[in-house]
Amino acid sequence: MLRILQFLYRLRSFLLFVLLEVLAIWLLVANNSPQGAAFFNSSTSMVGSMLETQSDVRDFFSLAEANEALVNENSRLMEQLKSLKTDPDSVELSLDSVLSSQFKFLGARVISNSLRYAQNHLTLNKGSEQGVKPGMGIFNESGVVGRVKSVSSNYSVGISLLNNDLLISSIIKSTGDFGSINWDGKNSQTAKLLYVPRHVKAQVGDTIVTSGFSAVFPRNINIGIISNIIQSGDPNYLDIEVALTTDFSKVSYVYLVENTEINELDSLYQKSEITNEF
Amino acid sequence: MNFRSLISFIVLILILGLFQILFLKNLALFGIAFCFIYLVGILSIPLQIRSVPLLLISFGVGLVIDIFYDTLGLNAAAVTFLAFLRPFWLKILRPNGGYDESTLPTLQEMGIGWFISYALPLIFAFCLVFFIADQWGTGSFIGVVNKSLFSSIFTLLLAIIVQLLFFKRRRGI
């Protein structure tokens, strides 16, 4: 017995090494599943406030650019609002008031962002006290940015679109065929459109937008533009490369969208035994 | 390791970690060369430290960096591997007379040739584990080796510059 203990004691550094590696890998695996519980991350209040101070300084230098983007977005929205307003002499039929209030929007600032790794995340300066919930979609004026993964009281962490784990249900705008956008981990400006059958007549230059099927994003938010279609490889699906419209190196202000009917949809899916994992 | 050098060592780790988190997080030269400057802290821990505390310190430092990077476990796994290899590598590199008790494994104390042969393989091992874990199942092996090679060279260059500029000679860190 003593011999065994002595032997183990002599091996102690190796055993500790193995233990720590297993612990690290367990943390890595447990923390990287898109729906899984996140342990410590940058939404912790101390880390969050530090990152916010850093981004305060950094964002100061890009204020002009952020302003310009906001002004453009405002003018676009004003135009839409004009077309929605009814003239005083016209008759308005309210078709379905439930449909119009299906999505709730919030604004937030990105205080930390990464784009060089295979699993990229971003940290936002709003948390559960401001109404952010896990599962909300993140986008900005130029396109989809990601999805909220976990929230603390004042900060939240999102999975960036530049993350192997995130699939976003999307359609080709001109033909209406749907597929899933997934990042291949190579370049922060391109992603892949998966599961588009070979018979689809997609063309280079077609716009990809969100489909609205997945109950995370509303319909018609830009994702990217088809930059290349490769016929070879998989016998069933096309290999489509998409140039993303969002410049992830410059994401600073984002919108969060919540589907207020997600619980009803989820329970409906469960009742009909559909597992819809987008 | 006396009290004074312990304090200055903690300050060193803090400064390097802060620099890593605030400035180097999204820096990648040509998209492949990353920099992990906080490894200088782990590499310049005094020679007589036992391997168990070394492993624990490294794991802790890696975990803190990970919390800021949102990659829990990634830096920790890689830096623990580095800490595990360090005593063996030091034994291989031992000069004829053995190490002096009070010397630190830094550029100033040991000279540039020794430091490169000490730091480069360890940093390369770190990078290899880091990028294999990061790109698990998605990246090609060539891509991983490529990133590791250039990242370790970049990190070594920055490590040499940092030590030349900020480390004092013969007075602890």
Image (tube, coloured by chain):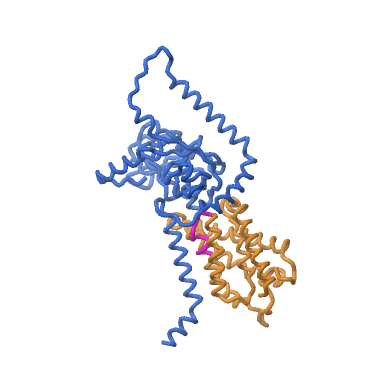
Q: Horizontally, is B153 left or right of A144 in the view?
A: right
Q: Is residue A153 left or right of residue A99?
A: right
Question: Which x, y percent locates residue A54?
Answer: 61, 48
Label the magenta part by its dominant secondary structure: helix
* B85 magenta-colored: no
Query: Is A253 placed above or below B54 here?
Result: above
The residue lying at 47 percent from left, 52 percent from top is A119
Residue at 53%, 54% in the rendered image = B69
> At x 53% / y 40%, what residue is drawn?
A247
Image colour for chain B is: orange
**Which residues fall within the magenta stretch?**
B69-78
Residues A148 and B143: in front is A148
Quarter of the rendering occupied by the C terminus of chain A? top left
Q: Residue furthest top?
A: A89
Front in this rendered view, residue A19 or B106? A19
Above or below, A121 relative to A91: below
Identified at 45% across, 59% down, the residue is A28
Q: Is residue A173 left or right of residue B152?
A: left
Res. B82 in view: yes
Q: Indicate yes or no whether the magenta region holds residue B70.
A: yes
Which quadrant of the rendered structure holds the N terminus of chain A?
A: bottom left
Q: Residue furthest front?
A: A129
Could you tell me residue A149's position as x and y percent? Answer: 44, 48
Name the foreground residue: B85 vs B42. Answer: B42
Name the tint of chain A in the rendering. Answer: blue
In front: A106, or B9?
Answer: A106
Q: Is residue A245 visible?
A: no
